[in-house]
Image (cartoon, rainbow, N blue to C red):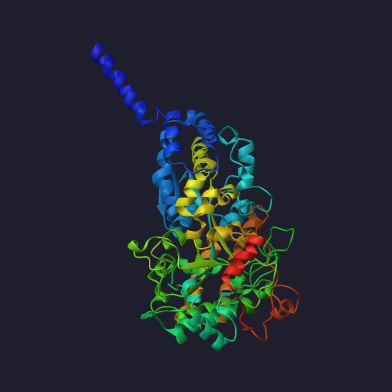
């Protein structure tokens, strides 16, 4: 009997241990000391925050939940390291699955359509803010934190410290998503080549102005031609003046919806997105929540001269100045290709790839010196001839925690605790050193990044500059991101293949966007599918009527290639510091 009792006690202890019975302050202290350094908090405040997590998670100890995100270094760190830490500290086990971006969007869309709980939370791009705020299938975090989720909302969360809060706020002023990682698409260039006196002199002789960071697309095009056609070789290696991608896949659609049209100048002034015409070319009048069209004939800009110009330049530069095979690359292949060291510049480069671009030479990275310092720099994106001061200048990806009403409340609470844990001040500085995808102001300004800045090619300088507000995600004009985003890549692919001209492709794209939005309008008017904020399309009229009005859509310019303009990189950094 005694042996049986001992066995029973041992079995119970084993079972409790498997469910994190020993989760607590000792485990928290171990992680704080060994992993969560440096931090924006003192160790005492880190332990205070961890104590709150332990107490808040106590009623949920032993649960096992499933979350999903795309595969980037930041999320790999969360999946491999932070999920384990969370389990050991709180006793809640998290299966943090990683998939491609397209698969994440598909899973989100499926959960919304079926109302079945596929995952307990997603790190889902804030590009869906217009979708989530209209469909009301995602949890309104503002109300959740004050109500049903109050007992599991961290008092040290500090929402105002998140630099992407505006990106995850709906037209109703409510927060629908919590930023987890952010990265911008900036201009990337080989500073060591740009600084060479012989190349500077040759460029000045050929183009009449200084070789430097291009301010406009005219200069970018000149520099692309210079390195691909005029220089051709550096140190015996064939080099190119441009890198991009063109594989006919969903990535190609995101390549364009990620602010490419607005970089050219399509759209209206306004931050974080153009009002009334956004970077997708969708028009939504100020003070309303109803998109009225994408076609110029309805007041939109998706097939406007500026949009067509943007697509034409993408196609021309890819064919003329990029390395052979670039047209068959996808997103994940093109950006790391820069580490080969044969490209002079890239106009559309994501800072999410900074971590791989500062890898040592021993790992095959040819764009760092023997001391590990980058031979390259990042700088603001150049703008096209249709761009006006007051418009956004690029894209900012803001992968953000999203929870759905279809998730049972207890599972949602456990997922919300994990979301706050991996974005907490306790862990964020260390996580940001791993992934270099900043979400908190306190992290960006942490002294450890001041020390590391010289090895990050301008990343810290950019995020500390006031200019960062010009890089923003897709906004609220897009009423249903999954339905509309999938239209883009086929049309753009037809340009790359030669089947359609840029004008034909954008005419077809705008028409299809309006067709899809017309279906949304019908569903909203019949059943309130979009909460009364679905599209209400303008009747089509002669496009000239809209093009002759002030603002977007903008009429075709007589000269789409003004004089190239550049700025010295060092002068740019001085301007940032002065501001």
Quadrant where the N terminus is found in the figure: top left
Question: Depth check: 354 or 284 in front?
Answer: 354
View extreme (top): residue = 1
What residue lies at 43% left-to-right and 35% top-to-bottom?
92
View extreme (bottom): residue = 206
What residue lies at 47% left-to-right and 31% top-to-bottom?
60
Quarter residue 575 falls in: bottom right
Question: Depth check: 161 or 481 in front?
Answer: 161
Answer above or below: position of 480 versus 174: below
User: Residue 516: x and y, percent?
Assistant: 58, 65
User: Residue 349: x and y, percent?
Assistant: 50, 67
User: Residue 96: x and y, percent?
Assistant: 42, 46
Apparent side of residue 13 relative to residue 96 in the rendered image (left or right)? left
Q: How many marks?
A: 0
Can residue 15 be seen by looking at this rendering? yes
Answer above or below: position of 375 versus 38: below
User: Residue 547: x and y, percent?
Assistant: 71, 78
Can residue 499 be seen by looking at this rendering? no
Quadrant where the C terminus is found in the figure: bottom right
Quarter residue 515 falls in: bottom right
């Amino acid at each position: 009997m005694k042996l049986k009792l001992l066995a029973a006690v041992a079995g119970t202890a084993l079972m409790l241990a498997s469910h994190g019975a020993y989760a607590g302050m000792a485990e928290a202290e171990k992680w704080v000391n060994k992993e969560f350094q440096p931090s924006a908090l003192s160790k005492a405040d880190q332990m205070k925050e961890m104590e709150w997590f332990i107490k808040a998670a106590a009623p949920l100890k032993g649960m096992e939940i499933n979350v999903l995100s795309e595969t980037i270094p930041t999320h790999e760190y969360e999946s491999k390291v932070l999920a384990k830490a969370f389990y050991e500290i709180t006793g809640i086990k998290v299966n943090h699955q990683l998939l491609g971006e397209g698969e994440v969007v598909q899973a989100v869309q499926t959960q919304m359509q079926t109302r079945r709980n596929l995952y307990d939370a997603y790190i889902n791009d804030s590009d869906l803010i217009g979708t989530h705020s209209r469909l009301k299938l995602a949890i309104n975090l503002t109300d959740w934190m004050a109500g049903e989720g109050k007992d599991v909302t961290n008092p040290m969360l500090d929402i105002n410290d998140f630099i992407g809060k505006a990106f995850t706020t709906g037209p109703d002023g409510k927060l629908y998503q919590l930023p987890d990682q952010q990265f911008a698409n900036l201009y990337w260039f080989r500073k060591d080549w740009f600084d060479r006196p012989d190349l500077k002199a040759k460029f000045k002789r050929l183009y009449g102005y200084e070789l430097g960071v291009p301010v406009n697309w005219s200069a970018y095009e000149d520099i692309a031609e210079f390195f691909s056609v005029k220089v051709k070789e550096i140190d015996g290696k064939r080099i190119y003046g441009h890198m991009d991608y063109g594989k006919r896949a969903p990535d190609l659609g995101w390549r364009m919806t990620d602010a490419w049209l607005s970089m050219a100048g399509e759209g209206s002034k306004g931050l974080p997105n153009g009002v009334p015409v956004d970077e997708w070319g969708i028009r939504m009048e100020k003070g309303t929540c109803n998109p009225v069209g994408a076609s110029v004939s309805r007041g939109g800009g998706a097939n406007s001269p500026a949009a067509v110009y943007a697509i034409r330049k993408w196609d021309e530069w890819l064919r003329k100045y990029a390395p052979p095979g670039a047209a068959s690359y996808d997103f994940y292949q093109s950006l790391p290709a820069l580490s080969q060291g044969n490209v002079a510049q890239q106009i559309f480069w994501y800072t999410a790839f900074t971590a791989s671009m500062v890898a040592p030479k021993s790992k095959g990275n040819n764009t760092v010196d023997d001391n590990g310092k980058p031979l390259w720099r990042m700088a603001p994106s150049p703008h096209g001839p249709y761009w006006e001061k007051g418009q956004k200048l690029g894209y900012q990806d803001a992968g953000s925690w999203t929870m759905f009403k279809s998730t049972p409340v207890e599972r949602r609470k456990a997922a919300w605790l994990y979301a706050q844990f991996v974005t907490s001040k306790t862990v964020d500085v260390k996580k940001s050193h791993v992934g270099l995808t900043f979400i908190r102001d306190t992290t960006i300004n942490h002294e450890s990044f001041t020390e590391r800045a010289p090895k990050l090619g301008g990343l810290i300088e950019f995020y500390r500059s006031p200019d960062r507000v010009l890089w923003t995600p897709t906004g609220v004009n897009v009423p249903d991101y999954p339905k509309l985003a999938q239209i883009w890549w086929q049309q753009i692919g037809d340009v790359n293949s030669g089947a359609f001209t840029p004008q034909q492709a954008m005419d077809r794209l705008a028409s299809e966007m309006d067709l899809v939005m017309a279906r949304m309008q019908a569903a909203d008017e019949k059943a309130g599918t979009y909460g009364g904020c679905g599209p209400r399309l303008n009747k089509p009229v002669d496009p000239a009527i809209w093009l002759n009005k002030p603002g977007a859509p903008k009429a075709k310019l007589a000269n789409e290639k003004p004089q190239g303009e550049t700025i010295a990189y060092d002068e740019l950094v001085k301007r940032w510091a002065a501001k």
